[in-house]
Amino acid sequence: MASELQRFVSLRLSRRGDRNNQSQKTKDAEESLVSGGSLPQDYPLKIVWKKGFIRLVLVAGILWMLLILSVLLFHVWSCQSSLSFLSAICNKESKVFNMLDTLGLVPKPQHRCSIPLANDPDSIIIPKKRTPDKIIQNLSYILEDEPVYNKSRPLFGGHQSWIQREKSFKLNSSMKVHCGFMREGGAEMNPLDVEYVKKCRFVVASGIFDGYDVPHQPPNISRRSKNLFCFLMVVDEKSFHFIKKNVTVREDNAGGKWVGIWYLVLLRDPPYDEPRRNGKVPKILTHRLFPQAQYSIWIDGKMELMVDPLLILERYLWRGKHTFAIARHKHHQSIYEEGDAIKRRKRYARPLVDLHMKIYRYEGMEPWSSKKRTVSDVPEGAVIIREHTALNNLFSCLWFNEVNLFTPRDQLSFGYVVYRLGDAFNFFMFPNCEYNSLFVLHPHTREHSSVIEWVKDLGELKGKGSQMKESRGGLGLWTPYPGNLDKVVLPPVVRTSKAG
């Protein structure tokens, strides 16, 4: 026990000795620093210079980073600016923009967003009365052309003259216009289908042409909507046979053909050479195919509807007291931007798109700007929600006539018809992110293409290549225009998106 105590005392003394030695060494170093015996005289200056240089580098680096960040933020802001000068200096194909996009610093519109829908289809109150027709009380349709045209084959869209076209934009209480379905022009329905659609007041319509889709079943349809709506799928004969080979088609007691909830409406003798143009018949002229319908919702054939149609009518028509609703385009607001994108993506003959746009420019169609009353001139036409009022029916006729006369790219014609009708035609253009929440988009079973889409020069449509030209559609582009288009210059286009 005594030996352990002695060992502990000696250990404490040795530690105290070490501490004393260290403190003595520190005092010696301080005395040496004060006397300057072992350190150089410029030692303090070197310390100050090193510290100052490090601070200078840090400050310069921070300022440089702030400068770069300011420039980059200005670059991004200029891309989003509505001022033409600022938007003109923004190049979204630049390396800087791509780098910011990769880092997630570029603001992007939402692809999907929640829709402010009513809670329950059963609680929706359906308007008892139609919206009154205040501007047009009587709308009728031209079914036969003037005798001067009788020598040529009857056309589905008719031989509308430039004078008739101009007159059709002048609103009157009683009007008679071209609106497709000319006698012996094609697109005839079976008598069985004609009888079936007579009972359809509420319609969800879609269409498949050229056999590149099958009907997709909407999963969220309430019992009330199933009893209220007719789900009508318009098909040509090629698509009908394609559907029969790939999905189950059942036949009801009256002979009607069904795929799930969809009733197949067969159109015989397609009116156009181009399948895309055939698809515009049920899409735009829904009121002509289904004349008893009071409301219709059009969706493209490759789409699977995810929202109950009663909720759609309540959200986009009845809640805001609208009669026509369509989504705005994701990328473009000007038809000239859309025309440029169509040419780049080879969606129709490039020189014919240019000619189409030159005619609209000659007739006063300005590029979209924030001064216009509409949020955009370019819609996403895959979903159209409308009440079949006389004015809406006239708008659909005029829109279709433009598609019939010019290119089948209906997004180019929509804004032009809105411009010609002025304040008389009001509609609701809802956000694109809501549009994407209405459906699930399925890929085509095969990609559609036609030879005219690849035409780069008018020479390819003449002489030996004349068979590339459509024979029953777009004839306005081949009829002498009553104005001088030689001096028309299309507005400059800023490409706002690679995808668009």
Image (cartoon, rainbow, N blue to C red):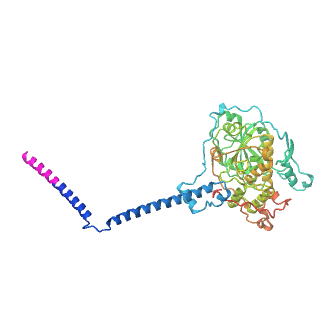
Instruction: Check if residue 88 falls in the magenta segment.
Output: no
Identity of the residue drawn at 86% across and 50% down = 167
Task: Identify the residue at the far right of this view.
Answer: 147
Q: Quadrant of residue 30?
A: bottom left
Q: Foreground: 129 or 463?
A: 129
User: Is 387 on the left-hand or right-hand side of 220?
Assistant: right
Task: Identify the residue at the far front of this view.
Answer: 35
Residue 32 x/y as whole percent: 24, 64
Q: Foreground: 322 or 294?
A: 322
Query: Does 42 appear above or below 388?
Result: below
Q: Foreground: 373 or 209?
A: 373
Evaluate whether residue 65 shows in this view. Answer: yes
Instruction: Check if residue 13 falls in the magenta segment.
Output: yes
**In the rendered structure, which segment of residues is drawn in magenta?**
1-16
User: Is 32 on the left-hand or right-hand side of 379?
Assistant: left
Residue 382 x/y as whole percent: 69, 48
Residue 326 x/y as whole percent: 70, 45
Identity of the residue drawn at 70% across and 56% down = 338
- The image quadrant where one finds the N terminus is top left
Q: Quadrant of residue 34?
A: bottom left
- The image quadrant where one finds the C terminus is bottom right
Q: Count all numbered tags in the image, as a single digit.
A: 0
Residue 426 x/y as whole percent: 75, 43
Q: Quadrant of residue 423?
A: top right
Task: Identify the residue at the far left of this view.
Answer: 2
Query: Does 296 appear above or below 155?
Result: above
Query: Does 200 appear above or below 31?
Result: above
Magenta stretch, main secondary structure, is: helix
